[in-house]
Image: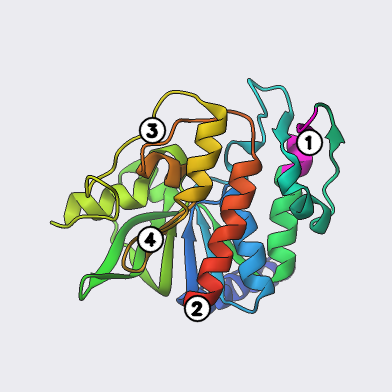
């Protein structure tokens, strides 16, 4: 029966992808812009990178632009990334460029996949594997199981580096601190928390604080901003893209 053949192909292909991803160089939780840029550059450098996104679609908050108006703003210093990924932009100010948010999100996803990043949607990171005071992997479950609050045990995936790119919610770092008596590499040893909007400062801190926050655990994008107490920046995305590129440069050397 053709129907069974179709089903068998889907199952075999998915399980093959999942088995290959059980041991990665880098696992990134969250599929937003910083994650996708990092995934692209890591895969391009020959690293085995896996991106896990709990929702059906990737791209994070990129799709909606500002208040549902489908444009986001970037600055000149991130144009080389857009040019490399063949994503169009239009100059609209002295140092401001408008990008169709749908083109940006889909372009980032396409290029990450094309470069070789393995992406799984509908997968939630619910915990971490922590051994010898170091993060060594993630504990995952199907997000529909999580949403339904069913008592179903998860599975684990191993990585040399784990990245929290879950955005404002900073979900992975939060679970690390909640379940373990330890401190992270912030000035307080705890999550400082996101502050109210300041575009320039938010972008600066997002890029500056992208990096390791606990042995084996890294933060990027708005997760870095929230972790270290930076302000939100709204629909301006240059810092997000540059954060992903910086993260990739760090991890290419580390893993």
Question: Is label 3 in a helix, a strand or a loop?
Answer: loop
What residue is shown with label 1? 99
Check the image and report above or below for 188 versus 252. Answer: above
Please say whether residue 89 is one of the residues in the magenta stretch: no
Near-viewer residue (62 or 52)? 62
Question: Is label 2 in a helix, a strand or a loop?
Answer: helix
Mark 2 or 3: in front is: 3
Q: Tell me where residue 168 appears, x and y as whole percent.
A: 43, 37
Which residue ends up furthest to the left in the rendered image? 181
Tell me which segment is drawn in magenta. 94-104
Left or right: residue 234 compared with residue 218? right
For the residues labelled 3 and 1, the Cα–Cα distance comes to 26 Å
Please say whether residue 100 is one of the residues in the magenta stretch: yes
Q: Which mark is residue 194?
A: 3
Q: Tell me where residue 15 appears, x and y as whole percent.
A: 54, 74
**Would you say the residues marked 1 and 4 are in contact, meaning their CB atoms lie under 8 Å apart?**
no
Quarter holding the N terminus? bottom right
Q: Which mark is residue 140?
A: 4
Question: Is label 4 in a helix, a strand or a loop?
Answer: strand
**Would you say the residues marked 2 and 3 are in contact, meaning their CB atoms lie under 8 Å apart?**
no
Task: Work out whether mark 2 precedes mark 1 in sequence or the reverse, and give the earlier one.
Answer: 2
For the residues labelled 4 and 2, the Cα–Cα distance comes to 14 Å
Residue drawn at x 43%, y 23% as measured from the top left = 196
Mark 2 or 1: in front is: 1
For the residues labelled 2 and 1, the Cα–Cα distance comes to 37 Å
Residue drawn at x 45%, y 31% as measured from the top left = 231
> Quick check: can you spot residue 57?
no
Q: Tell me where residue 135 appears, x and y as whole percent.
A: 31, 68
Residue drawn at x 74%, y 29% as measured from the top left = 71
């Amino acid at each position: 029966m053709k129907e069974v053949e179709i089903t068998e192909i889907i199952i075999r292909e998915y399980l093959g992808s999942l088995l290959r991803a059980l041991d990665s160089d880098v696992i990134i939780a969250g599929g937003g812009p910083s994650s996708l840029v990092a995934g692209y550059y890591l895969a391009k450098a020959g690293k085995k990178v896996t991106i896990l996104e709990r929702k059906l679609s990737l791209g994070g908050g990129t799709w909606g632009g500002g208040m549902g108006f489908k444009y986001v703003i970037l600055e000149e210093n991130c144009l080389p990334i857009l040019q490399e990924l063949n994503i169009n932009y239009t100059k609209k100010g002295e140092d401001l460029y408008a990008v169709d948010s749908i083109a940006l999100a889909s372009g980032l996803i396409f290029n990450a996949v094309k470069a070789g990043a393995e992406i799984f949607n509908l997968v939630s990171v619910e915990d971490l594997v922590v051994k010898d005071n170091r993060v060594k992997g993630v504990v995952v479950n199907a997000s529909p199981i999580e949403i339904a609050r069913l008592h179903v045990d998860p599975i684990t995936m191993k990585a040399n580096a784990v990245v929290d790119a879950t955005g404002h919610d900073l979900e992975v770092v939060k679970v690390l601190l909640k379940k373990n008596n330890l401190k992270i590499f912030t000035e307080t040893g705890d999550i400082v928390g996101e502050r109210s909007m300041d575009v320039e400062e938010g972008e600066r801190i997002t890029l500056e604080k992208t990096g390791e926050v606990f042995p084996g655990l890294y933060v990027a994008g708005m997760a870095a901003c929230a972790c270290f107490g930076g302000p939100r920046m709204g629909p301006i995305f240059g810092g997000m893209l540059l954060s992903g590129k910086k993260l990739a440069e760090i991890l290419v050397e580390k893993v």
